Amino acid sequence: MAATKASERPRRGSAPSARTRVARHPERGLYEREQVDAILDAGFYGHLAFALDGQPYAMPMLYVRDGDELFLHGSVKGRFAREIVGDVPLCFTVTLIDGLVLARSAFNHSVNYRSAVVLGRAHAVTDRARKLRAMDLLVDHIIPGRTSDARQADAGELKATEIIALEIEEASAKVRSGGPVDKRKDMQMPIWAGVLPLALVAGEPVSDEQARAPVPEYVKRRLRA
Amino acid sequence: MAATKASERPRRGSAPSARTRVARHPERGLYEREQVDAILDAGFYGHLAFALDGQPYAMPMLYVRDGDELFLHGSVKGRFAREIVGDVPLCFTVTLIDGLVLARSAFNHSVNYRSAVVLGRAHAVTDRARKLRAMDLLVDHIIPGRTSDARQADAGELKATEIIALEIEEASAKVRSGGPVDKRKDMQMPIWAGVLPLALVAGEPVSDEQARAPVPEYVKRRLRA
């Protein structure tokens, strides 16, 4: 689509495999790791796709990137968690919605978004120090500054925490940005066209009734981000 | 988790199959279709999970619910779209993030969210009237009021639009709401605890430079929603 800037196209290196090549709107596909990483670092939850007995699932999980790995934590636990580690192909997708694009024609309506698709395999994080590191990174990724304030996990809590590490074997990104793109013949129509920006925005913090400290500065900063 | 209200638990009917039973935190699982539908109707994009040659994928798609079907539209096109219709098991997951839950201990941090997981099979929507209906529903689901304002798709555009219909064969929902739940021994700690509400919020509309109409009322309403 014309609204995708040429500067967003891949500039160098590694041709995508058939698995991650963007089939439609190829100009929206970005294969640069730095661009993928920028999307991964801007989000904090995504959807893990895995198949069990031929049935695919997409399950929401919190994550943080640590170099070439993603630490995942969330609703994929117990029964599922045991079956998705090891030599099992996985996909983790992060999608950030940036706006609704209203064109003059229904057909040209679109959504501005950034999405990153990561393919790889995962293993359970069992080493205690590594698990603690993953938890710290995760909490600080979601609310920068929180890790040094909250009580750190004790041995029992660490043991009860399930974290899996997904190695980024392959990754691609897809971005749609900019305004509506209408057909020339539609441009004169008396129909409003434009973008309605959307963002996951924080509202005023709601203190726990028994909280014994005021709202910290780092929470207020998160509010403004 | 204690923060999930008892009233959110399933009240009647259909026991979940092993495929949709919530493995961990079973008290967060809701199998009532009306509760699933409320989540599906509150969102407008989700992630479709499918497997190709043993590799699972999760791809973002726009959707609207129409009774027991979801009309899906989005980045799963071309090569992929042909392979996911028919007798192929799919999963479509919608996740709405409601807030970050900050407990006194790192371990008890959580996220408030509503997610719906739909399992089913899909077919391509090829009938022209049905495709038009799907497009109208989709546009009006995302921006109520837009369909009667925008130029309707012509025959060529309808043909070029790829919509798939996913039949809801099985569905479940998972909800986490409420404040942090800390251990008794942590309650006296001088650490702030509470919820930072999050929502996908619309900002001020950005009019296309050549727009020949003012921002419509229904767009302003969407802004306040």
Image: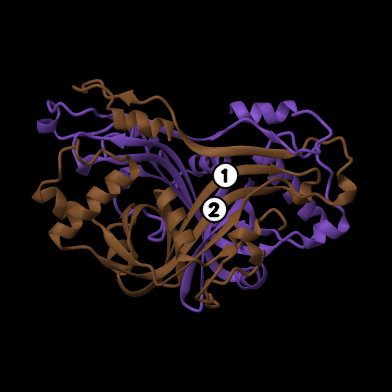
Chain colours: A brown, B purple
Secondary structure under the numbered disc 2 in the rendered image: strand
Image side of residue A102 versus residue A215, left or right: right
Nearer the observer, B196 or A171: A171
Distance, label 2 to label 1, CA atoms, is 8 Å
Percent of width and height locating residue B160: 78, 62
Q: Identify whether B209 is placed above or below A86.
A: above
Percent of width and height locating residue A55: 46, 68
Q: Identify whether B38 is placed above or below B194.
A: below
Residue at mark 2: chain: A
Image side of residue B72 versus residue B175, left or right: right
Residue that appears at 19% across and 35% down: A149
Image side of residue B152 versus residue B216, left or right: right
Whether pointer 2 and pointer 1 mark residues with C-beta atoms closer than 8 Å, the reply is yes
Residue at mark 1: chain: A
Q: Identify whether A23 is placed above or below B39.
A: below
Where is the C terminus of chain B found, in terms of image quarters?
top right
Q: Identify whether A196 is placed above or below A32.
A: above
Specify which label sits upstream in the sequence, 2 or 1. Answer: 1
Whether residue B73 is visible, yes or no, is yes
Q: Which residue is mark 2?
A: A114
Nearer the observer, B219 or A43: A43
Q: Which residue is mark 1?
A: A98
Task: State which quadrant residue A167 falls in.
Answer: bottom left
